[in-house]
Image: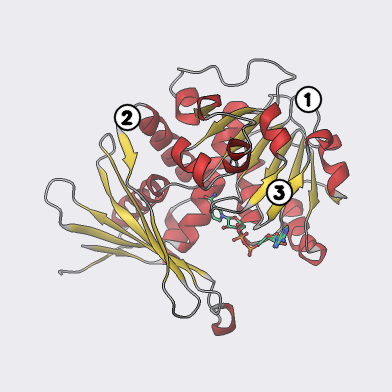
């Protein structure tokens, strides 16, 4: 069995590996070759923690396993990140444990890869301004992955806590892009692509603020009750997601579904676009929205890549159980 630490994951897996792994598994999900098992998520009544499992099987890539972890709000005081996760990969032929892989860095990488896959397939080719709503831990990963997909010339950003924006500005500068902090009412007038990545529980991005032709990657809503996008904007957009079942229950479309503004059949798995079964964007004026809810198969795809690369590079520890 291999052990692949957080440090080794950072050394061996980059954005291109994550993009390729996530794009492939979204395609496999849409063709029925990969599926996610029901998610378990529990408030354990200790340390205020939320703990759970996300698991699945990809028959194409032969990746079977689970990501176990959750959210421990007291961790920051202990010098640890609040989100903690570990991936377990099993041999699909024997059921034996193949690898234990640190999941914290990979979670940020695979989440950024998902929005970046959506930009690659759905954003207008002439997109030049990237709009960021959110400036927390995930936002830097999101920005770095997004700017590789189009010839962006500028980043505009808004955050609920404005003091967090300079750190995101530094990331934009490292990517060689000018950065402007704007009011959220103004962000959509400039942005051609907008990523929302916050823990908001009320809409932050309203329909009238977004121009025709915009692509939105709504990435923050991954739980019942969270919300970043005006349901009217969801109703006006062509909708894509990683997994429909998650999108309508815990993703951004949950609110528009509940109020009857959209139906489940209005939402397309992005894998269908990847596989060439759906055209994706069909006009320059269409607003496209990708609801990235985060599925276990994304975690397994990047963790399996990490285990493979770490083994090849002699960086994985081998132990007998
Ligand atoms: P973080 O705690 O580092 O940052 C939180 C962000 O939300 C900050 O920008 C903060 O200013 C903002 N925020 C906090 N309260 C707000 C409010 N009331 N209104 C508007 N904005 C508010 O978190 P993070 O690790 O960057 O994660 C951001 C979000 O992304 C979380 O909701 C997390 O659960 C979600 N997430 C989704 C996926 C996925 O696959 N879709 C994966 C990882 C994280």
Determine the image quadrant of residue 9: bottom left
Question: Looking at the image, is mark 1 or mark 3 earlier in the sequence?
Answer: 3
- State the CA–CA distance, disc 1 to disc 3: 27 Å
State whether residue 176 appears in this view. no
Q: Where on the image, by quarter, is ligand 1?
A: bottom right
Whether residue 13 is visible to the viewer of this picture, yes or no, is: yes
Would residue 167 appear left or right of 199 to someone viewing this image?
right
Mark 1, secondary structure of its residue: loop
Residue at (62% x, 32% y) in the render: 260
Which numbered dot is residue 245?
none
Q: Residues within 10 Å of mark 1 (few under 14, many from 20)?
A: some
- Tell me the residue that label 2 is attached to: 32
Tell me residue 22's x, y (percent).
44, 40
Q: Could you tell me how far apart the alpha carbons at marks 2 and 3 are, in whole angstroms?
A: 37 Å
- Give the distance between the C-alpha atoms of the residues marked 1 and 2, in whole angstroms: 33 Å
Front one among 11 and 143: 143
**In the image, which is nearer the foreground, mark 2 or mark 3?**
2
Circle 2 residues within 10 Å: few <14, some 14–19, many ≥20: few
Residue 304, compared with residue 147, is above or below; it is below
Q: Mark 2: which secondary structure? A: loop
Considering depth in this image, is 1 or 212 the residue closer to the camera?
212
2 or 3: tag closer to the N-terminus: 2
- In depth, the one of 251 and 98 nearer the eye is 251
């Amino acid at each position: 069995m291999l052990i692949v630490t957080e440090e080794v994951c950072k050394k061996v897996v980059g954005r291109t590996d994550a993009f390729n792994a996530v794009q492939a598994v979204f395609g496999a999900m849409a063709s029925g070759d990969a599926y996610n098992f029901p998610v378990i998520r529990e408030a354990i009544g200790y340390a205020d923690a939320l703990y759970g499992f996300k698991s699945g099987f990809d028959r194409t890539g032969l990746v079977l396993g689970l990501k176990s972890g959750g959210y421990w709000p007291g961790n920051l005081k202990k010098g640890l990140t609040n989100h903690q996760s570990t991936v377990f990969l099993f041999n699909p032929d024997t059921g034996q444990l193949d690898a234990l892989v640190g999941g914290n860095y990979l979670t940020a990488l695979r989440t950024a890869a998902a929005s970046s896959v959506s930009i690659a397939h759905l954003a207008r080719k002439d997109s030049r301004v990237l709009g960021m709503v959110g400036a927390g831990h995930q936002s830097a990963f999101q920005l770095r992955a997004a700017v590789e997909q189009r010839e962006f010339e500028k980043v505009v950003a808004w955050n609920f806590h404005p003091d967090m924006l300079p750190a995101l500005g530094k990331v934009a500068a490292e990517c060689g892009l000018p950065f402007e902090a704007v009011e959220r009412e103004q962000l959509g007038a400039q942005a051609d692509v907008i990523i929302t990545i916050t823990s908001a529980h009320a809409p932050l991005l309203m329909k009238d603020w977004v121009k025709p032709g915009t692509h939105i990657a709504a990435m923050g809503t991954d739980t019942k009750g969270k919300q970043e996008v005006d349901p009217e904007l969801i109703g006006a957009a062509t909708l894509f997601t990683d997994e429909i079942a998650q999108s309508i229950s815990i993703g951004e479309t949950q609110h528009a579904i509940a109020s009857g503004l959209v139906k489940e059949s209005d939402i397309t798995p992005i894998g269908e676009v990847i596989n060439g079964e759906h055209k994706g964007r069909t006009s320059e004026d269409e607003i496209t929205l990708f609801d990235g809810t985060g599925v276990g198969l994304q975690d397994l795809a990047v963790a399996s890549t990490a285990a493979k690369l770490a083994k090849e590079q002699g960086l994985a520890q081998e132990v007998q159980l």
